Image: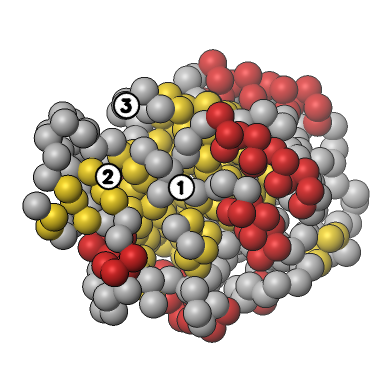
Amino acid sequence: MVAIAGCARGGGAGAPVPIPIPAVLAIPGLPLALRSVVYLDVAEIPLSGALICAGGDVMLGSNLDTAWAQRAKRVAPFAGFLPSPDSLLAPLRPLVADADVVLLNIEGAIGGGPAATKCRRGSTHCYQFRQEVAVAGALRRLAPAAQVVGNVANNHAGDAGPLGFEQTVTSLVSEGLAVTGADTLPALVPLADGDTLAVLGFSTFSAGPDARDLMTVRRQVSQAAARYRPVIVSVHMGAEGVDAQRTRDADEWFVGEDRGNPVAFARAAVESGAAIVFGHGPHVLRAMEWRGDALVVYSLGNLLTFGPFTLTEPLNRGGFVCALLDRRGRVLSAELRATRQMPPGRAVRDSTGRAWTVVDSLSALDFPATGVRVVDGQLWRH
């Protein structure tokens, strides 16, 4: 007997197995979970799935550039120099309570002690971020029941210099996080069914493999896909700010830097076997699209950035994209769990649905044939 059913987590022996049926995929107006799968009533074959939730930039206050503290007090006074990282993360915990894996972009070094000055005197586009040591443990406690993966392939994880970068990775690993983007090797996350999730980190900066070198991107993703399933890609690239909401198939530049072509990168990653591409770096939400069975999120925006960040509209909107994957590495369903930030950087659930509207509109503009439709947070196909 064959029956269409919604996509649910969990399962075990006797649970139905998702099988793609082209006729079902062609039914217009059907929700993503229903259009992607049908269930066979075969007791001998178990269902296996993993819920992957990814958030954008995370920077829980800087202990290097402290001038922002006085500015922040004028906007929204807070007790002490820096709030505890656990208190900043507390409002986000319910959003990932059901996740198996949580992926975050660590937008700043972690550690203490002196560090070389990164920025030239008088610079207006240079920022130096380092978070206190306690941040690493707090990030792990964001989702105690899940594996937390930190991406350090970005332009701020090395803000305390090479030794500071090494200390950042060591701090994260010592607290039980998996780290991606520190080198060319994927972070490996064992799943409950015995499969292994591989997470690769790329950026257009010195940390991590170069997202602009598409031949290398294809080679590294395909090598990972040949050994592990599913493969998830985290990438820090693209222009920044309120003028960087649109996504085009072209090279992007910011403050004289080549920030790469995010569409070409996504194409290379997906064609090489990536199930999901999670982008970040522009500090705003961007479009999302379906490339076959794969999901591409061009920018997750700011998730939790306490301190020297501008948080006016639309820079205050972010969220987690949570995707349910089957054991073949296909996306069964996905949703945007929207957040917003209030100065100087306290994140809460976005009950207005503004982030849903932003992503839906941008996806329709930039990818009219393949862009996601966002309905009550659920990511549908057109």
Q: Nearer the viewer, residue 238 or 308?
A: 238
Colour style of the rendered protein structure: secondary structure
Q: Nearer the viewer, residue 254 or 81?
A: 254
Q: Which mark is residue 94?
A: 2
Residue indicated by mark 1 = 54
The amino acid beneath tag 1 is Ala
In front: label 2 or label 3? 3
* Residue 250 placement (x, y as % from top left): 75, 72
State the separation of the CA atoms marked 2 and 3: 24 Å
Residue indicated by mark 3 = 193
Which callout, 2 or 1, points at the residue further toward the start of the chain? 1
Q: Is residue 31 left or right of residue 41?
A: right
Q: Residue furthest top?
A: 174
The amino acid beneath tag 2 is Pro
* Residue 175 placement (x, y as % from top left): 49, 19
Which callout, 2 or 3, points at the residue further toward the start of the chain? 2
Question: Could you tell me which residue is drawn at 74 percent across and 26 percent down?
Answer: 164
Q: Is residue 359 above or below residue 265?
A: below
Q: Residue furthest front?
A: 1
Q: Which mark is residue 123?
A: none
